[in-house]
Amino acid sequence: MRINMLLALWLLVAARPLWPQTEDPAALLQRAFQAQQTGDYVASAEAYRAFLKLRPDEVGAHSNLGVVLVKLGRYDEAIAEYEAAGKLAPDDPRIVLNLALAYSKSGRLREAAAQLETLHSTAPQDVQVTLLLADTDLRMGEDQHVIELLTPLEDSPNLAVAYMLGTALIRTKRIGEGQVLLDRILKNGDSVEARFLLGTRMFESGDYPAAVKQFASAIELNPRLPELQSFYGQALLITGDADGASEAFRRELANNRNDYRANLGLGQILVARRHFDEALPLLQQAVLVRPQTPEALHSLGEALLGLGRAREAQDKFAMAKSLGWREQTAESDPGPKVNEPAPNFSLPEVGSGKAVSLRGFKRKTPVVLVFGSYSCPNFRGSAAALEALYAKYGRNIPFLLVYIREAHTQQNWESTRNVRAGIAVAPAANLAEKQEHAMMCSRKLHLRFPALVDGMDGAVETAYAAWPSRAVIVGIDGQVLYSTRLTELDFHANEMAACLKRASAK
């Protein structure tokens, strides 16, 4: 390599030192290279910098300093050195590749992808570059581009191709095509990659309980596989285990601080828990990795708002809105929409057995409908806040608990959070058992407002898309004023209180 030739030349010159050692380029270069070889990267960086003050146009020194700075985790400084080397040797693909890797390690994935695209366009046959570009795109969520890149290599014996292409196909809901590649990996025996890909298939198919178990089994083989803990955290969050999800996200970030889903997921949980200062750097990193993602921008805006930085928050909200935030959130929630008629129902009240009809409240008073079951961790987690809202507004606005199908049972979709809490509820076999579950739920959660029981056909649950839990405020005109799922990320007691305050003033 050129740096070795230069080192040999400088060593010959160093046989007759003409300057003090601190100013001798040959000695500085020798010290820098030796320190780099022995792993003393701090000393190596200092020596390379001193050398470059004397020889600023030496490409190899800039490049080697970039390598050393990457080892030290000083990625921005490494990028500057690679860029300097690139200006001196613009046609050297090794410098472009190192620059791309430094961008990637710093979380600037789009800039990394741009450098890799340059290399790929000049050498499309270079499999290493193609795989690095595909991996970068996969981390950015550019699944379609991954498919375009790797489909020509589909028959390659390289299992990395099968793994990344299969993952991209499954994430784009092309489950059958992804399964073919998954089977190829499985034929090579059990592996963490096979288990992770199988869990991803379950996750994308909506079978979150199975995905939780599959991801957990993959973690037993290799807890450090990139994105594994992140997906495990997402599956735990969806099944109501925010604490378990937080731990998984933190484990992912300990190994990969640039993981988008872990930064976003943990940041959102911390915002929901009002730990805005801790959430802020996580959400900033999520936006850095995927700057055009409305969900990350909106969550960053919430963190800034919580810290009192309202002007910056509004800028992020505006950016999120311009990228389709409202449309995205509306589409993601199948529940009743604001300003639409609330579906009518007539259900028996627990205890008295009298029929309670939603239509009976129309033109008289607004009403709050709380849907849930005792086996739903999110419902249990929001119960205290709902009871506090009832204590404040219940005199003027009736609250009703509508007990629906159990969210988690040992027979179907067991929750990790329930396992830790020792909660196990069997599915109700008939209406009488469902009423007993409702009474037990109200008693254990100290809910003072009346409870109704949905029929065994789950008609009301279906009409409100209420499973596993939901809260709805119906106005005096029978229109929906407010609707939210009761997950830790979706339910905000202050927003519901504001709606109740407006409703009670009318």
Image (cartoon, helix red, strand yellow):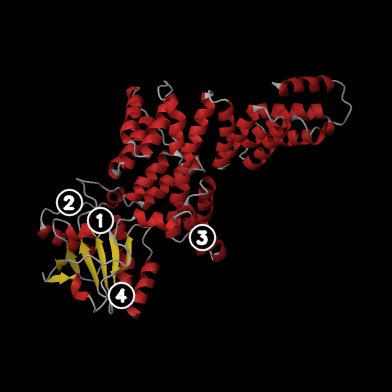
Mark 3 or 1: the one toward you: 3
Residue to which mark 1 is pinned? 467
Please provide percent x and percent y for residue 26.
80, 26
Please determine whether, in this image, residue 323 is positioned above or below residue 198: below
The answer to whether residue 65 is left or right of residue 431 is right
Residue to which mark 3 is pinned? 318
Distance of mark 2 from mark 3, alpha carbons?
46 Å
Residue 426, label in figure: 2
Please provide percent x and percent y for residue 80.
68, 39
Distance of mark 3 from mark 4, alpha carbons?
36 Å
Asked where in the image residue 119 lies, by quadrant, the reply is: top right
Instruction: Tell me the residue at 74%/33% (across/down).
Output: 48
Residue situated furthest right in the rendering = 18
Q: Are marks 1 and 4 in contact (CB under 8 Å)?
A: no
Dot placed on the residue nearer the N-terminal end, 3 or 1: 3
Residue to which mark 4 is pinned? 391
User: Given the image, on which type of amino acid does mark 2 rest?
Assistant: Ala
